Image (tube, rainbow, N blue to C red):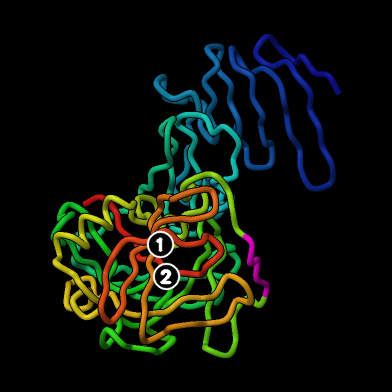
Amino acid sequence: MIETPDNFYAGVRTRNSQREYFMGTIGDRWSVFDNNVGGERISVLPDGNVGIATTTPDPSALLDVSSTTKGFLPPRITTAQRNAIAAPAEGLVIYNTSEKALNVYDGTAWSSMKPVPPCGLPISISHLVSGGVAPVDKVVSYGTVNNIPGDPTKCWITRNLGADQQASGASDATEASAGWYWQFNRLQGYKHTGAVRTPSDWLGVNSGNSDWQAANDPCALELGTGWRIPTLTEWSNVDASGGWNNMFSAYASALKLHSAGYIGSDAGNLGSRGTYGYYWCSSQDSESNAWNLTLGPGESYMSGDYKGYGFSVRCLRDY
């Protein structure tokens, strides 16, 4: 029904047995009016300002939502889904269900609105298989530390990513201390009990001419925006300044690095847990090899190894 009952109203009235609405102009604004509750639900002013549950949106706001009992709900997506957004616009806002925080794109990178606890305090992380990174669901409390010789301005976690506990010694061979393993520049982490690998799928061949890409960084995806895998320079500086010459001196540092072993690139079997440790850098050495910190009974050095190996990951962020 088209109604123009007077000079104040002009529009369409719709009704059924449950509800009656008026949609049209009221005075100088366009409105959706709910006759059952006797109020305007949406108002659009001549200057384009939109009010929801208010007829007087603030002049400084293009959209003004008024309520004392409800909130504004942005799109809720995981970190992986956020990173898959093609060409995000500067100022784009989402709620990150992986971080449990609002994220804003500044035109270059995503930033988190979640308060960052001071370095030195633990951070509790809920790892979920559904995120495409963690091999199992679990909650881990990671210790954090800074003032590490060679790179004192960074904040580090004090156990391997995915580890239930900090290693008890340089030769700790337990799965709980080892944490998970990653192939270079791949999202998926792997748990290995020594007999069973989770997940069971394994891609032995791994090559690609790039450093570890931010969209695939398990530190950022699991711990939150700002966390990342150390670069070759950062690991090299810490190794040299710490005076490490074997896995025992590396464990004696505040980082408590230890011999978590590796997963072989061919069959995906576990090796050297308790005798050697390998920690990825984010920097590649060549199309087929990437840099890592290698720790053993008599050595501590930067090595370029095949990207198909599964090595440990230790995370840091700028402090």
Residue located 34% across and 83% down the image: 165
Image check: 2 left or right of 172? right
**Is-magenta flag for residue 40?**
no
Residue 177 falls in which quadrant of the image?
bottom left
The answer to whether one can see residue 71 in this image is no
Residue 155 location (% of width, % of height): 23, 58
Which amino acid type is marked by label 2?
Ser
- Cβ–Cβ under 8 Å for marks 2 and 1: yes
Q: Label 2 belongs to which residue?
A: 312
The stretch in magenta equals: 201-205
On residue 280, the disc is 1
Residue 29 left/right relative to 127: right
Q: Residue at x 62, y 72 (%)?
A: 266
Quadrant where the N terminus sits is top right
Q: Is residue 111 above or below residue 21?
A: below
Mark 1 nearby-residue class (10 Å; few <14, some 14–19, many ≥20): many
Q: Residues within 10 Å of mark 2 (few under 14, many from 20)?
A: many
Residue found farthest to the front: 298
- Label number found at residue 248: none
**Is residue 14 among the parts visible in the rendering?**
yes
Residue toward you, 286 or 176: 286
Q: For the point 22% across and 62% down, which residue is it?
A: 239
Residue 88 picture location, percent across and down: 54, 33
Residue 163: quarter of image: bottom left
